[in-house]
Amino acid sequence: MSRQRSLEAILSSEYVTIGELVRITETRYSTLKYYTEEGMIPFEQEEEKLTRRYKRDITIKQIERIKKLKKFGLSIDELKKELKENPNEL
């Protein structure tokens, strides 16, 4: 089992893991995994079995945007449509 990086190290890193996103966005792991699988938050993965890496700044802004849109009562399909139609509105 690997040792967790400090919050300071995470916040200064360009890339983070999904577990680190859980810590810094206070979003459930299962929620972030679902958003990833639905294509709502982008990630990089060098090979099939390697850890998914998320660009910290962009991903945090995207998660905040999703949370804000959810407060308006948008369904998952509506959220995905909004994110696709306005990808740069972070």
Image (cartoon, rainbow, N blue to C red):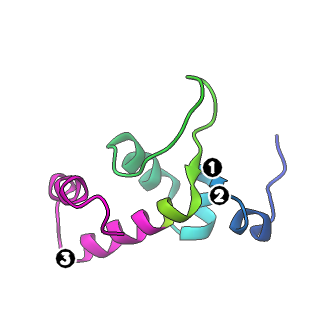
**Badge 3: residue crowd in 10 Å (few <14, some 14–19, many ≥20):** few
Kindly state the secondary structure of the residue where label 3 is placed: loop
Instruction: Name above or below for residue 6 compared with residue 50.
Output: below
Disc sitting over residue 17 in the figure: 1
Amino acid identity at mark 2: Glu
Kindly state the secondary structure of the residue where label 1 is placed: loop
Amino acid identity at mark 3: Phe
Kindly state the secondary structure of the residue where label 2 is placed: helix
Residue 80 shown in magenta: yes
Residue designated by label 2: 20
Q: Please provide percent x and percent y for residue 7.
A: 75, 69
In this view, the residue in front, 40 or 70, is 40
Disc sitting over residue 36 in the figure: none
Residue at coordinates 58% horizontally, 60% vertically from top-left?
56
Residue designated by label 3: 72
Q: Which quarter of the rendering shows the C terminus? A: bottom left
Residue 85 shown in magenta: yes
> From this viewpoint, which residue is outermost toward the top?
48
Region in magenta: 61-90
Instruction: Name above or below for residue 86 compared with residue 3.
Output: below
Tags 1 and 2 touching, CB below 8 Å: yes
Q: Please provide percent x and percent y for residue 5.
A: 80, 58
